[in-house]
Amino acid sequence: MIKNLLSLATLLGGAALAQDSAPELSSGDTAWMLISAALVLLMTPGLAFFYGGLTRSQSVLNTMMMSVMSIGVVGVLWMLAGYSLAFGEGGNALIGGLGNLGLEGLKDQLTGTIPTYVFAAFQAMFAIIALALISGAVVERMRFGAFLLFGALWTLLIYSPLAHWVWSADGWLFKDGALDFAGGTVIHISAGVSALVAAFVIGPRIGYPRTAHVPHNVPLVLLGAGLLWFGWMGFNAGSALSAGHTAALALITTLIAPAAAMLAWLAWESAGNGKPTAVGAATGVVVGLVAITPACAFVSPWAALLIGALGATASYWTVQFKHRLGADDSLDVFACHGVAGIVGALLTGALAWTTGSGKALPEQMLTQLISVVASVVYAGLGSWALLKLVSVLTPLRVPATQELTGMDLHAHREQGYSENETGLGAPIFLGGD
């Protein structure tokens, strides 16, 4: 049972858990965290719009449903066991205790100055979008049921342990002093690497890379990026777990870094093909948000500008040479989340001194590097093993005919748009998954 939160948000991240001699409930902090939790929840539907616009029209609903269903699957699992595995009292360096299964023992308890129920809900939103991010690498070809089964196992066996390592006072990376304010390693590196592994295991889309797979609805992409940016304010600033100076710093850096990343992405794009694109602008925003996430309350505003620009540069060139990775990561999850997350995590160590916090630079950089490597190895090997396990229970991939004609009718008996090949607006049943 978590009793309270030590005010280490300015040093070791908003999710640090420890004892406080005299915890007191703050209605102001609680109100801020209720709003922040709602903002982070909105990010997952925002991601659904972002991903949905990038796919073909005949698979838009299936793509969006992978994000939406993450809310259902992870929301239930977080209550049953995920929270306890990540933050449960009585744990060790690798995993939380089991005393909070079903969220037992949290009633009337405080985490810092907010009810622990609110903290648990806020952290649930992080776990939800982490799984949803992975779906972008396997859209238009992975069976819906197989994705949900993999996602359930991934949440409990990969995400929750990583969250414990980095954000629990018992976690080995927390004790080592790893800086990850709002999820660079826990969410973006783990999801990005897991997405790349999934793309390897499941294989490329039919026709890739000879056939172009272009976005079917760019306005949806822009809408999704806007909702993500809006929700990300709660994602980063909310990780302070209080309404104060730490949240203010996280908020302003979450404005600056994506703005710089968008401009950097468009500059590279214009230099390459002479035209800045709307998809490029939206992608640059998301990459900047990813890059600043681990650093947002540890670095100064000018450092945030640098992180955004460097994160966008690294991700842009990864996308340009993605074919060399040998995997069809459909929506560039690894390039935009894995790579930007790695850049952000390392730059957190390099630039944390700009606010006067952290260890000596060489020592902090080594700690950051260890946290990055640990996340990459654990998420990569763990995801490979889970995908192989799921493949024993159910096929991972849909038949070729379903992939070619689109996922929506086959998986969900409905279509995203009424203007379809049959001329009918009503759902049509074509059989199972």
Image (spheres, rainbow, N blue to C red):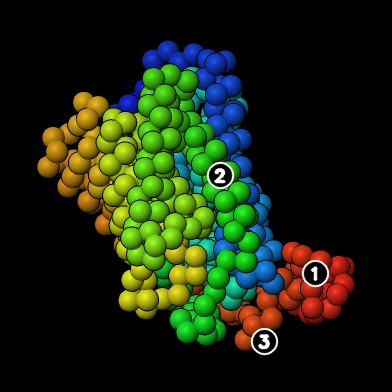
Relative height, residue 171 to residue 33 (above, below): below
Q: Which mark sits nearer the N-terminus, 2 or 1? A: 2
The residue sitting at 13% across, 35% down in the picture is 360
Residue 53 lies, in percent from the top left, at 61, 60
Q: Amino acid at mark 3?
A: Thr
- The residue that label 2 is drawn on is 226
- Going from N to C along the chain, the mark reached first, 2 or 3, is 2
Q: Which residue is mark 1?
A: 419
Does any portion of residue 91 appear in the rendered image? Answer: no
Secondary structure under tag 2 reads: helix
Cα–Cα span, label 2 and label 3: 35 Å
Vertical position of residue 348 compared to residue 370: above or below: above
How far apart marks 2 and 1 lie (CA) works out to 27 Å
Amino acid type of the residue that numbered disc 1 sits on in the rendered structure: Glu
* 231 or 180: nearer the viewer: 231
Q: Name the residue located 73 percent from the left edge and 76 percent from the top edge.
A: 410
Quarter placement of the C terminus: bottom right
